[in-house]
Amino acid sequence: MFQDNLLAPSPPWILEALHAVHRHQALRADQVAALAGADPSTIDADLRSLCDQGLLSVVRVPRGLGSAALDDAYLLSGMGLLALQRAGLAPPGRLPRRPRGLYTLAHDLERNQFGVVLERLDAEGALTLERWTTARTALGFAAHLPEKGTLVRIPLVADAFAVVTHRGRTDGLLVEIDMGSVPLARMKAKYAGYIRWWQGGGPLKRFGLRSLRVLTLAPTPARLRQLLDCAAESTGGQGSGLLWFGTLDLLSLDAPEAFLGPVWARGDAPGARQALWP
Protein backbone atom coordinates (compact mmCIF):
# COMPACT_ATOMS: atom_id res chain seq x y z
CA MET A 1 0.00 0.00 0.00
CA PHE A 2 2.81 2.44 0.90
CA GLN A 3 5.54 2.72 -1.72
CA ASP A 4 8.80 2.67 0.22
CA ASN A 5 12.18 2.95 -1.37
CA LEU A 6 15.66 2.83 0.15
CA LEU A 7 16.32 6.55 -0.34
CA ALA A 8 12.93 7.83 0.89
CA PRO A 9 11.16 5.36 3.16
CA SER A 10 7.59 6.16 4.13
CA PRO A 11 7.36 8.05 7.44
CA PRO A 12 6.03 6.02 10.37
CA TRP A 13 3.07 8.34 10.97
CA ILE A 14 1.24 7.71 7.67
CA LEU A 15 -1.67 5.79 9.17
CA GLU A 16 -1.95 8.34 11.97
CA ALA A 17 -2.14 11.11 9.38
CA LEU A 18 -4.74 9.32 7.27
CA HIS A 19 -6.76 8.60 10.38
CA ALA A 20 -6.67 12.27 11.40
CA VAL A 21 -7.87 13.40 7.98
CA HIS A 22 -10.61 10.76 8.10
CA ARG A 23 -11.82 11.97 11.52
CA HIS A 24 -12.00 15.59 10.46
CA GLN A 25 -12.76 15.11 6.73
CA ALA A 26 -10.32 17.89 5.75
CA LEU A 27 -7.15 19.25 7.35
CA ARG A 28 -4.32 21.65 6.60
CA ALA A 29 -0.75 20.38 6.69
CA ASP A 30 -0.01 21.99 10.07
CA GLN A 31 -3.13 20.38 11.54
CA VAL A 32 -2.05 16.96 10.27
CA ALA A 33 1.43 17.48 11.74
CA ALA A 34 -0.05 18.43 15.12
CA LEU A 35 -2.18 15.28 15.29
CA ALA A 36 0.17 12.76 13.69
CA GLY A 37 3.42 13.85 15.32
CA ALA A 38 4.98 14.62 11.95
CA ASP A 39 7.86 16.99 11.29
CA PRO A 40 6.33 20.42 10.51
CA SER A 41 9.32 21.32 8.33
CA THR A 42 8.71 18.44 5.91
CA ILE A 43 4.98 17.85 6.30
CA ASP A 44 4.00 19.63 3.08
CA ALA A 45 6.33 17.51 0.96
CA ASP A 46 5.32 14.35 2.82
CA LEU A 47 1.60 14.98 2.26
CA ARG A 48 2.21 15.75 -1.42
CA SER A 49 3.92 12.37 -1.63
CA LEU A 50 0.81 10.72 -0.16
CA CYS A 51 -1.23 12.54 -2.79
CA ASP A 52 1.09 11.16 -5.50
CA GLN A 53 0.48 7.67 -4.09
CA GLY A 54 -3.28 8.21 -4.31
CA LEU A 55 -3.89 8.10 -0.55
CA LEU A 56 -4.90 11.76 -0.25
CA SER A 57 -6.19 14.50 -2.49
CA VAL A 58 -5.50 18.21 -2.13
CA VAL A 59 -7.65 21.28 -2.84
CA ARG A 60 -6.57 24.93 -2.74
CA VAL A 61 -9.01 27.01 -0.68
CA PRO A 62 -9.16 30.69 0.33
CA ARG A 63 -8.00 31.39 3.87
CA GLY A 64 -11.11 33.42 4.64
CA LEU A 65 -13.88 35.51 3.16
CA GLY A 66 -12.32 37.99 0.73
CA SER A 67 -8.78 36.77 1.42
CA ALA A 68 -6.28 36.39 -1.43
CA ALA A 69 -4.21 33.91 0.60
CA LEU A 70 -4.72 30.22 -0.13
CA ASP A 71 -4.38 27.09 1.98
CA ASP A 72 -4.01 23.46 0.95
CA ALA A 73 -6.84 21.31 2.26
CA TYR A 74 -6.03 17.59 2.35
CA LEU A 75 -8.84 15.08 2.00
CA LEU A 76 -8.87 11.30 2.16
CA SER A 77 -9.12 9.38 -1.10
CA GLY A 78 -10.82 6.05 -1.69
CA MET A 79 -7.43 4.34 -1.59
CA GLY A 80 -6.62 6.07 1.69
CA LEU A 81 -9.89 4.92 3.19
CA LEU A 82 -9.14 1.37 2.06
CA ALA A 83 -5.75 1.55 3.79
CA LEU A 84 -7.43 2.61 7.04
CA GLN A 85 -10.06 -0.10 6.76
CA ARG A 86 -7.40 -2.77 6.22
CA ALA A 87 -5.62 -1.48 9.33
CA GLY A 88 -8.83 -1.61 11.37
CA LEU A 89 -8.92 2.17 11.77
CA ALA A 90 -12.09 2.87 9.79
CA PRO A 91 -15.41 1.03 9.55
CA PRO A 92 -16.67 -0.41 6.27
CA GLY A 93 -18.34 2.15 4.05
CA ARG A 94 -17.70 4.93 1.62
CA LEU A 95 -16.16 8.36 1.98
CA PRO A 96 -18.53 11.10 3.18
CA ARG A 97 -19.69 13.63 0.64
CA ARG A 98 -17.24 16.48 0.22
CA PRO A 99 -18.24 20.02 1.27
CA ARG A 100 -19.79 22.07 -1.50
CA GLY A 101 -17.79 25.15 -2.42
CA LEU A 102 -14.32 26.37 -1.54
CA TYR A 103 -15.52 28.84 1.10
CA THR A 104 -17.46 26.07 2.82
CA LEU A 105 -14.27 24.03 2.91
CA ALA A 106 -12.34 27.04 4.25
CA HIS A 107 -14.94 27.38 7.01
CA ASP A 108 -14.62 23.67 7.80
CA LEU A 109 -10.85 24.01 8.20
CA GLU A 110 -11.41 26.73 10.83
CA ARG A 111 -13.99 24.54 12.57
CA ASN A 112 -11.60 21.60 12.50
CA GLN A 113 -8.91 23.76 14.09
CA PHE A 114 -11.14 23.82 17.18
CA GLY A 115 -11.29 20.02 17.20
CA VAL A 116 -7.54 19.69 16.67
CA VAL A 117 -6.82 22.02 19.61
CA LEU A 118 -9.13 19.97 21.85
CA GLU A 119 -7.43 16.74 20.74
CA ARG A 120 -4.02 18.25 21.51
CA LEU A 121 -5.16 19.35 24.98
CA ASP A 122 -6.59 15.87 25.58
CA ALA A 123 -3.30 14.25 24.53
CA GLU A 124 -1.42 16.55 26.92
CA GLY A 125 -3.74 15.68 29.81
CA ALA A 126 -5.04 19.25 30.16
CA LEU A 127 -8.63 18.08 29.67
CA THR A 128 -10.59 15.04 28.54
CA LEU A 129 -12.39 15.25 25.22
CA GLU A 130 -15.37 12.99 25.75
CA ARG A 131 -17.06 13.69 22.42
CA TRP A 132 -16.55 15.71 19.26
CA THR A 133 -18.98 15.76 16.37
CA THR A 134 -19.65 17.95 13.36
CA ALA A 135 -22.51 15.86 11.92
CA ARG A 136 -25.52 18.07 11.26
CA THR A 137 -27.87 15.23 12.16
CA ALA A 138 -26.39 15.19 15.67
CA LEU A 139 -26.45 18.97 16.06
CA GLY A 140 -29.70 20.23 14.63
CA PHE A 141 -32.63 21.45 16.71
CA ALA A 142 -34.85 24.52 16.79
CA ALA A 143 -36.40 27.12 19.08
CA HIS A 144 -39.66 29.03 18.73
CA LEU A 145 -39.73 32.77 19.44
CA PRO A 146 -42.86 34.89 19.85
CA GLU A 147 -43.24 37.54 17.16
CA LYS A 148 -46.32 39.60 16.31
CA GLY A 149 -48.73 37.23 17.99
CA THR A 150 -47.26 34.06 16.52
CA LEU A 151 -44.31 31.73 17.06
CA VAL A 152 -41.40 31.90 14.64
CA ARG A 153 -39.25 28.81 14.25
CA ILE A 154 -35.49 29.49 14.56
CA PRO A 155 -33.34 26.62 13.25
CA LEU A 156 -30.29 26.07 15.45
CA VAL A 157 -27.51 24.06 13.84
CA ALA A 158 -24.09 24.70 15.36
CA ASP A 159 -20.86 23.94 13.51
CA ALA A 160 -19.66 21.42 16.10
CA PHE A 161 -20.44 19.95 19.49
CA ALA A 162 -17.91 18.91 22.11
CA VAL A 163 -18.24 17.34 25.53
CA VAL A 164 -15.25 18.23 27.68
CA THR A 165 -14.27 17.27 31.21
CA HIS A 166 -11.89 19.66 32.96
CA ARG A 167 -11.07 19.67 36.68
CA GLY A 168 -13.89 17.26 37.41
CA ARG A 169 -16.53 19.30 35.59
CA THR A 170 -18.18 18.11 32.38
CA ASP A 171 -19.53 20.70 29.95
CA GLY A 172 -21.15 20.65 26.56
CA LEU A 173 -19.78 23.18 24.08
CA LEU A 174 -21.77 24.16 21.02
CA VAL A 175 -19.34 25.78 18.59
CA GLU A 176 -20.21 28.56 16.14
CA ILE A 177 -17.42 29.44 13.69
CA ASP A 178 -18.16 32.90 12.34
CA MET A 179 -16.43 33.95 9.12
CA GLY A 180 -18.07 37.38 8.99
CA SER A 181 -20.50 36.44 6.21
CA VAL A 182 -23.73 35.86 8.16
CA PRO A 183 -25.93 38.98 8.57
CA LEU A 184 -25.97 40.36 12.11
CA ALA A 185 -29.76 40.26 12.25
CA ARG A 186 -29.63 36.54 11.66
CA MET A 187 -27.02 36.07 14.41
CA LYS A 188 -29.18 38.12 16.81
CA ALA A 189 -32.15 35.83 16.10
CA LYS A 190 -29.93 32.78 16.53
CA TYR A 191 -28.68 33.93 19.93
CA ALA A 192 -32.25 34.63 21.04
CA GLY A 193 -33.14 31.13 19.88
CA TYR A 194 -30.30 29.55 21.83
CA ILE A 195 -31.35 31.35 25.00
CA ARG A 196 -35.00 30.33 24.56
CA TRP A 197 -33.92 26.73 23.94
CA TRP A 198 -31.69 26.77 27.03
CA GLN A 199 -34.43 28.24 29.22
CA GLY A 200 -36.71 25.39 28.14
CA GLY A 201 -34.24 22.74 29.31
CA GLY A 202 -32.88 22.10 25.82
CA PRO A 203 -29.38 20.93 26.83
CA LEU A 204 -30.74 18.18 29.07
CA LYS A 205 -33.39 17.09 26.59
CA ARG A 206 -31.13 17.15 23.52
CA PHE A 207 -27.74 16.14 24.89
CA GLY A 208 -28.38 14.84 28.41
CA LEU A 209 -26.29 17.65 29.89
CA ARG A 210 -27.16 20.30 32.44
CA SER A 211 -24.03 22.38 31.84
CA LEU A 212 -23.63 23.74 28.32
CA ARG A 213 -22.26 26.87 26.68
CA VAL A 214 -22.39 28.28 23.17
CA LEU A 215 -18.98 29.44 21.95
CA THR A 216 -18.72 31.80 18.98
CA LEU A 217 -15.34 32.45 17.38
CA ALA A 218 -15.07 35.54 15.20
CA PRO A 219 -12.43 36.37 12.57
CA THR A 220 -11.58 39.86 13.89
CA PRO A 221 -11.96 41.90 17.10
CA ALA A 222 -14.34 44.25 15.23
CA ARG A 223 -16.64 41.38 14.29
CA LEU A 224 -16.39 40.08 17.86
CA ARG A 225 -17.72 43.41 19.18
CA GLN A 226 -20.60 43.27 16.70
CA LEU A 227 -21.55 39.76 17.81
CA LEU A 228 -21.38 40.77 21.47
CA ASP A 229 -23.82 43.60 20.65
CA CYS A 230 -26.09 41.08 18.95
CA ALA A 231 -26.02 38.89 22.04
CA ALA A 232 -26.91 41.86 24.25
CA GLU A 233 -29.75 42.96 21.96
CA SER A 234 -31.18 39.44 21.91
CA THR A 235 -31.67 39.66 25.69
CA GLY A 236 -32.88 43.23 26.00
CA GLY A 237 -29.42 44.51 26.85
CA GLN A 238 -28.70 42.09 29.71
CA GLY A 239 -26.57 39.54 27.88
CA SER A 240 -26.37 35.89 28.88
CA GLY A 241 -23.82 33.62 30.54
CA LEU A 242 -24.82 30.94 28.05
CA LEU A 243 -23.05 32.81 25.24
CA TRP A 244 -19.25 33.07 25.13
CA PHE A 245 -17.11 34.75 22.49
CA GLY A 246 -13.53 34.67 21.26
CA THR A 247 -11.49 35.21 18.12
CA LEU A 248 -10.27 32.49 15.81
CA ASP A 249 -6.62 33.26 16.50
CA LEU A 250 -6.89 31.94 20.06
CA LEU A 251 -7.01 28.44 18.54
CA SER A 252 -3.25 27.96 18.33
CA LEU A 253 -1.50 24.72 17.41
CA ASP A 254 1.75 26.05 18.84
CA ALA A 255 0.09 27.01 22.14
CA PRO A 256 -3.18 25.04 22.47
CA GLU A 257 -3.27 25.84 26.20
CA ALA A 258 -4.28 29.42 25.24
CA PHE A 259 -7.78 27.99 24.83
CA LEU A 260 -7.92 27.48 28.61
CA GLY A 261 -6.77 30.99 29.49
CA PRO A 262 -8.68 34.21 30.22
CA VAL A 263 -9.35 34.95 26.56
CA TRP A 264 -13.14 34.63 26.38
CA ALA A 265 -15.81 37.32 26.61
CA ARG A 266 -19.07 36.26 28.23
CA GLY A 267 -22.33 37.60 26.91
CA ASP A 268 -23.34 39.12 30.23
CA ALA A 269 -19.86 40.57 30.93
CA PRO A 270 -18.56 41.66 27.50
CA GLY A 271 -15.90 44.04 28.82
CA ALA A 272 -13.92 41.41 30.72
CA ARG A 273 -11.92 38.42 29.56
CA GLN A 274 -12.16 35.21 31.52
CA ALA A 275 -11.43 31.50 31.32
CA LEU A 276 -14.04 28.91 30.47
CA TRP A 277 -12.98 27.02 33.59
CA PRO A 278 -11.70 29.36 36.32
Image: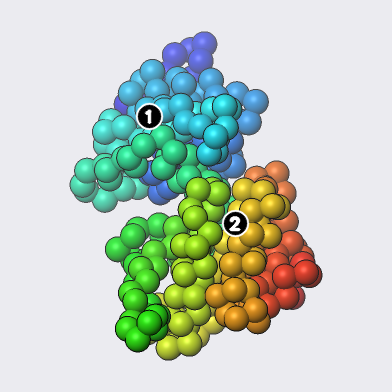
Estimate the x, y position of residue 272 in percent, counting from the top left. Answer: 78, 70
The quadrant of the picture occupied by the C terminus is bottom right
Q: Residue furthest left?
A: 93
Looking at the image, which residue is at 44% across and 75% down? 193
Looking at the image, which residue is at 54% across and 48% down? 179
The three-letter code of the residue at mark 2 reads Leu
Choose top left, top right, bottom left or bottom right for residue 82: top left
Against 165, residue 224 (above or below) is above
- In what element is the residue under mark 1? strand
Estimate the x, y position of residue 91 in percent, counting from the top left. Answer: 26, 50
The three-letter code of the residue at mark 1 reads Leu
Against 16, residue 91 (above or below) is below
Identify the residue position indicated by label 1 in the image. Answer: 56
Mark 1 or mark 2, earlier in chain: 1
As measured in the structure, the alpha-carbon distance from the residue carrying label 1 to the one carrying label 2 is 29 Å
Against 75, residue 194 (above or below) is below
Q: Identify the mark at residue 217; answer none if there is no mark.
A: 2
Estimate the x, y position of residue 231 in percent, counting from the top left. Answer: 59, 71
